[in-house]
Image: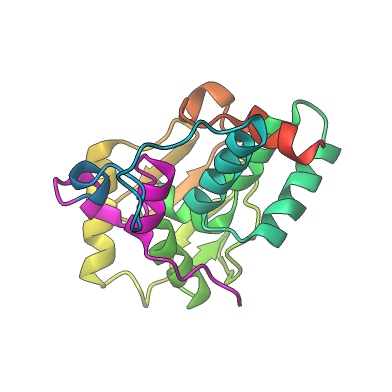
């Protein structure tokens, strides 16, 4: 399976904002964006040239890909699915990304980061409606129950991640029982529930060319 092996903090610095790729470190003063808020590389601190419209659209698409940990080919397929659905393509895209099993597991606190949650999924650590699912791109539907497999529940790192997620608060579209490490995907999130720092319309403009 292809993966993006770039340093996670480097990806955040390239986009100029926190993408929350490193788990709890992103919530501390050790965050790379807090310490060095300029692009990585030899010329990172020099004045950045103004981006063209295409450059702005490309950067937004790259940011969205990095947030959800998806490579270009798979991201393009998800966009094509979103475009075929009824409604606004940009909102459909975000809903498809948020309904992926790795993202749902991360949102429920079953991993300190999306990459950690994805690893748990890949290692048969997540059940959907009582059935083991090890495909991170599996799309969870409204009403589906997602839980941690019994063999994984004793892991202290996972419990700590779930407790930290509970302290920060769970999204409105999820219902989570932290003690049981179990949750329900109530419905797809509305656009108003998702971060305003994402401008999905730029991604739609880029792919519409």
Quarter holding the C terminus? top right
Residue bounds of the magenta highlight: 1-30
Of all residues, the one furthest to the top in this rendering is 192
Give residue 134's position: percent from left, percent from top. 57, 72
Which residue shows up at 29% across the image and 64% down it? 158
Relative to 117, say whether 125 is above or below: below
Q: Is residue 2 left or right of residue 158?
A: right
Q: Nearer the viewer, residue 168 or 37?
A: 37
Q: Nearer the viewer, residue 163 or 19?
A: 19
Task: Quadrant for residue 70, please give it.
Answer: bottom right
Confirm whether residue 143 shows in the render. Answer: no
Q: How is this picture coloured?
A: rainbow
Task: Quadrant for residue 186, please give it.
Answer: top right
Relative to 141, say whether 113 is above or below: below
Of all residues, the one furthest to the left in this rendering is 29
Relative to 41, say whether 176 is above or below: above
Give residue 100's position: percent from left, percent from top. 59, 53
Q: Is residue 54 magenta?
A: no
């Amino acid at each position: 399976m292809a993966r993006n092996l770039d340093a996670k903090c480097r990806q955040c610095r390239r986009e100029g904002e926190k993408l929350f790729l490193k788990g709890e470190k992103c919530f501390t003063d050790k965050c790379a964006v807090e310490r060095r808020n300029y692009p990585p590389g030899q010329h990172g601190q020099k004045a950045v040239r103004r981006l063209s419209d295409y450059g702005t659209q490309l950067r937004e698409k790259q940011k969205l890909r990095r947030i959800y940990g998806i490579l270009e080919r798979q991201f393009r397929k998800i966009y094509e699915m979103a475009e075929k659905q009824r409604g606004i393509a940009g909102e459909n895209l975000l809903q498809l990304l948020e309904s992926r099993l790795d993202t749902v597991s991360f949102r429920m606190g079953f991993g300190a980061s999306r990459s950690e949650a994805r690893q748990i999924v890949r290692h048969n650590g997540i059940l959907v409606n009582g059935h083991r699912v090890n495909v991170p791109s599996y799309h969870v539907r409204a009403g589906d129950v997602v839980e941690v497999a019994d063999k994984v529940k004793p892991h202290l790192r996972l419990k700590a991640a779930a407790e930290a997620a509970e302290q920060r608060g769970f999204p409105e579209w999820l219902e989570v029982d932290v003690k049981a490490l179990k949750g329900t995907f109530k419905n797809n999130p509305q656009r108003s529930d998702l971060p305003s720092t994402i401008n999905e319309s730029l991604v739609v403009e880029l792919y519409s060319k």
